[in-house]
Image (tube, grey):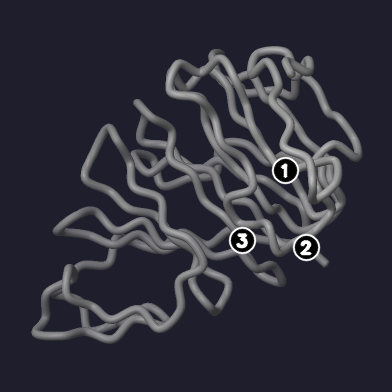
Amino acid sequence: MKRSLRMPQPWSKSSHQQPPCLAAENGDPRQRKISKVVLANISTSSSRMSYPNCQGASYAPSLPAQLYEFTASDEMPRTVAFHPSQQIFACGFDTGVVRTISLAASKLLEEHKQHHDSITGLIFSPDGNFMYSCCARGTLALYNCAVQKSHIVRVLANVVVQDADHGPDALSISADGHLLAFVGPSEYIVTLMDARSLDEAI
């Protein structure tokens, strides 16, 4: 089935159309009630927050003004991550697809299909040069985002614990961007890897 990404016009408090799972309160976008949020991610470079909702859409509201809705048919968003310095966020889906989306241009930038199960972890390096993703099958992927067209650098199988319960924040990176940490390959082991090569550090 053909999948599509729908990106409507920015939705603001003056609009009468409400996104799914949001209830307006006093007409202020900052006061809307959210019935179910799996994970929220706040941009460090701007006043934006991104989160997947309960009906298959990813929202990126600008605080306090606009709310952008990005939807993909037949898929559920599982985790989101903001680029630390650009108006870009990444979203991982239950199908294993990872997409990067430009807020400035309101369009899809890249679509990665290295995973074959629900995304359980998604994170950018502090400098924004790398992105990492993992899925419920234990696969870990490293992407180079330093160039205009991001590309895959390395994919490792069976390194992250194979359990969707560890999502949506199964990955963690050190503040200096040198080390990537996660639980795996079993639930009793924490692994540290070189964040630039995915070579095991400890």
Q: CA distance from mark 1 to mark 3?
A: 18 Å
Locate residue 96 relative to residue 179 in the image: left or right: right
**Mark 2: amino acid:** Lys
Q: Quadrant of residue 178?
A: top right
Q: Say whether disc 2 or disc 1 marks the residue closer to the N-terminus.
A: 2
Q: Secondary structure at mark 2?
A: loop
Q: CA distance from mark 3 to mark 2?
A: 20 Å
Q: Secondary structure at mark 1?
A: strand
Which corner quadrant holds the C terminus? top right
Dot 2 corresponds to which residue? Answer: 2
Dot 3 corresponds to which residue? Answer: 78
Dot 1 corresponds to which residue? Answer: 183
**Could you tell me if residue 52 is visible in this image?**
yes
Q: Say whether disc 1 or disc 3 marks the residue closer to the N-terminus.
A: 3
User: Residue at image x 50%, y 25%?
Assistant: 174
Q: Nearer the viewer, residue 191 or 71?
A: 191
